[in-house]
Amino acid sequence: MPQVFDKRWHNTYALNAAPGAAGVTCTSTLPGRGPRAGKERPVSDSGLSALLSPSSVAVVGASRKPGKVGHDILANIVGGGFAGAVVPVNPAAGEILGLPCVPSLAEYDGSVDLAVVAVPAAAVPDAVRGCIRAGVRALAVISAGFRETGEEGAEREEQILRLCRAHDVRLLGPNCLGFINTGISLNASFAGGMADRGGISVFSQSGALCTAILDSAKQRRLGLAKVVSIGNKADLTEVDLLLALARDEQTRVIIGYLEDIRSGDDFIAA
């Protein structure tokens, strides 16, 4: 079942599941299983900072149509009150939600810390290349259609992972909901509404559970610090998030929901 890590005393508590809810079994990945098995990548402070606390955000695949993921993410960023620069990227639009669009990040004059990518899976590698050429330091790939869909999707996921690692760019996802940082009023997800500010941080492999936690926290008036949907964990994993959130001044309690653990030894050490 889900675990709560209280970083002040380094204790672990089991959360009681609701009646009828499924339990969660966490298992360690066996050594040698797949190209990502073994030791986790060392945490890049600058890359994680650019992801979780960016000063500027681009939405690649921003849409003019409400209900589209690219529109809802942009609307959440704007509506949440994020004070940094927000750059919609759409070659077919002049502006969205009152913000001027650029056809590609190559045509944006400023710098961008974080790009949230919401384009069809087949277009993601080219989008990632464009972001890297523009100097983006972190990526959150919302798009589905990767390892979770089979061999072709797994190859595509490995392709974007290689691109990111070759240029020291941190990658959240793919196939994720995005994330929320209440400390800077940033909702870079397609979950509706900004959470109240508090000291509880959540990372989850399940985007649906993230939205359920957000809804429950709102009803119970529980304040949250960060909510991170880690999706397929191509690059950033539970270990990276545990280490980063343990150093986060706003975070007092860490909650994690996992369906598998990439490296059991590193998880325990974190």
Image: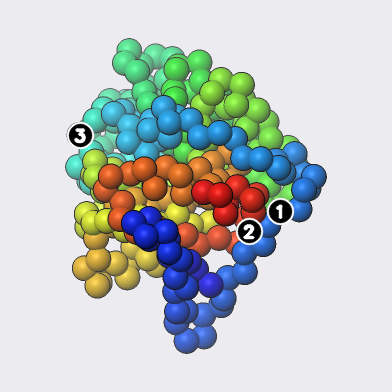
SS for callout 3: loop
Q: Residue 265 vs residue 35: left or right?
A: left
Question: Crowding at label 1, few (<14), some or many (≥20) Cα neighbours within 10 Å?
Answer: some
- Residue 151 on image: x %, y %: 77, 45
Work out which residue is located at the far front of the displayed protein and give it: 9
Q: Relative to the observer, which residue lies in front, 120 or 192?
A: 192
Ranked by sequence position, the earlier of labels 3 and 2 is 3
User: What amino acid type should be assigned to the residue bearing mark 1?
Assistant: Thr
Question: Crowding at label 3, few (<14), some or many (≥20) Cα neighbours within 10 Å?
Answer: few
Marks 1,2: beta carbons within 8 A: yes
Cα–Cα span, label 3 and label 2: 36 Å
Dot in front, 3 or 1: 1
Q: Is residue 208 above or below residue 89?
A: below
Dot in front, 3 or 2: 2
Ranked by sequence position, the earlier of labels 3 and 1 is 1
- Residue 88 on image: x %, y %: 35, 30
Residue picked out by circle 1 = 29
Residue picked out by circle 3 = 83
Q: Residue at x 33, y 44 (%)?
A: 248
The answer to whether residue 4 is seen in the rendering is yes
Q: Residue at x 31, y 51 (%)?
A: 251
Q: Is residue 135 above or below residue 225?
A: above
Q: Residue at x 37, y 26 (%)?
A: 113
Cα–Cα span, label 1 and label 2: 7 Å
Q: Relative to the observer, which residue lies in front, 32 or 168?
A: 32
Q: Residue 189 vs residue 154: left or right?
A: left
- Residue 72 on image: x %, y %: 35, 47
Q: Relative to the observer, which residue lies in front, 143 or 214?
A: 214
SS for callout 1: loop
